[in-house]
Every structure is written in structure tokens, then in C-alpha cells.
Amino acid sequence: KAGVTQTPRYLIKTRGQQVTLSCSPISGHRSVSWYQQTPGQGLQFLFEYFSETQRNKGNFPGRFSGRQFSNSRSEMNVSTLELGDSALYLCASSLQGRNLGDSPLHFGNGTRLTVT
Amino acid sequence: GESVGLHLPTLSVQEGDNSIINCAYSNSASDYFIWYKQESGKGPQFIIDIRSNMDKRQGQRVTVLLNKTVKHLSLQIAATQPGDSAVYFCAESRYSSASKIIFGSGTRLSIRP
């Protein structure tokens, strides 16, 4: 069974631009969540989607947004990029969308975004 | 490889010895705890979890201990191998939460041959 797939693997953007990251969950998984990982702040929760609806959201500005499609694939968008947005963006999927403990998150290998 | 954290606490262990990685959690309302392993260039990988109604859980070569009184979590790895080299994160959440996990800052485990 294929794992969580994230594309692209690496991305370099300029301040002020926008970027879209893609995530394909494990087949059959309906919940997709996104995390940002930086050396300074560690792993931080961005948001979670289930059945095409955002169900949970972290403390990030509105420049960070996402969506989920009917096939459970998800995209994350960051507009008006800032230098501080440079990070590893991780997508995770789970089988069930209700209780985290019933189906732990499976992470992809991330997209490394560099903003110059 | 990609750096997960520049100033992570590091635990250096002799190959074959047991490793103990400690973690303090902050939220008394958390009732579900997870350990993740992250190797260079990869995403976090689930190792083992434990609910707050337990104080110990064992997996293959790993044991998680939970002390709710002092809000402390530990991961024990038996007979540490070179492949265990990674950054280890403890994480807390609510069992009924869909996906929001609060991660700790991580500990880098280094294996001496």
C-alpha cells in the first residue's frame, strides 16, 4: 500500500508569491491534516480536512488555507509568502476521521519550502 | 540531510544498550499520547501510543511509560540499533480529537558503535 505522497519535494519561492502544495493520502484514508515544521517552532498543526470540510484549524494567519477534494486528496495554499514561511510542510492522513486514537496519523515526507 | 532542529537535546547511547527518552507534557486535559520517530529527510513515523487510562504499554522493542501525576512520558528502546538513530518526538492530544496533535520539541538519539 502506497504511503502519503506529497508533491513537490522541494520548492523555492520569492517573498510575496503564493504557493500550492499537494498531498495524496493513503488509499481509503479520509482525514488529511497539515503540519508546519521549523527548527525554531517545531511541529505545529495547521488544519485538518475530512469529507471536503475543514474540521479543525491551528493558530496560523489567513494566508494559509487548504482544501480537500472528493477523492480525499488535499492541497494547501500559502499566499503573500514571507521569509518566515520557510519550513517543511507535512501532510498526514488517517483512516477514520473521528477518534485520533482509533487510527494514528501517517505522515508523508513533506515539501521543503524555501522563501527568498 | 535535512535538519529537524538545530538545538535539540541529544542522547548518545552505545549500540546494544537500552535507551530511555523522556518527555514532559503540558496539558492536563490530554488523554492520548504518541511517540514518533523522524529520520533525516523523512516525515514522522508512528512508534507507539498510550491512553491515559494506562501507565505502561509495550511494543516491539519499545515501551512507553506514562506518569499522569507529574505529567511525564518516557520511551524505552531495548537493545538499541544503528537504525534507531533519529529524532524522537512525544506528542499529546485528546483521544476524541480528529487530528490536532501537540508535539514536543524532540530528542535526537545518537548511537555509538
Image (spheres, coloured by chain):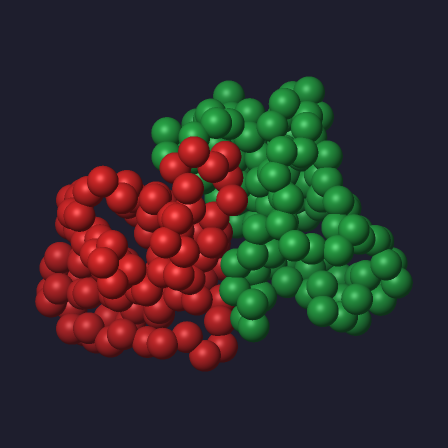
Chain colours: A green, B red
Seen at 42% across and 46% down, the residue is: B93
- Horizontal placement of A101 versus A114: left or right? left
Q: Residue B113: x, y in percent?
A: 18, 73
- Horizontal placement of A36 versus B23: left or right? right
Q: Residue B71: x, y in percent?
A: 29, 60
Depth check: give the residue in front, B78 or A53: A53
Judged from this view, the residue extending furthest toward the right is A16
- Horizontal placement of A75 versus B54: left or right? right
- Horizontal placement of B85 versus A39: left or right? left
Seen at 27% across and 44% down, the residue is: B52
Instruction: Using the rendered view, name the quadrant where residue B53 is placed.
Output: top left
Q: Residue A101: x, y in percent?
A: 37, 35
Depth check: give the residue in front, B92 or A37: B92
Seen at 30% across and 68% down, the residue is: B109
Seen at 51% across and 44% down, the residue is: B100
Instruction: Using the rendered view, name the quadrant where residue A61 is placed.
Output: bottom right
From this view, report whether residue B55 is shown above or below residue A30: below
In this rendering, does residue B76 appear at all? yes
Q: Residue B68: x, y in percent?
A: 25, 54
Count of labels shown? Answer: 0
Instruction: Using the rendered view, name the quadrant where residue B17 is placed.
Output: bottom left
In this rendering, does residue A5 appear at all? no
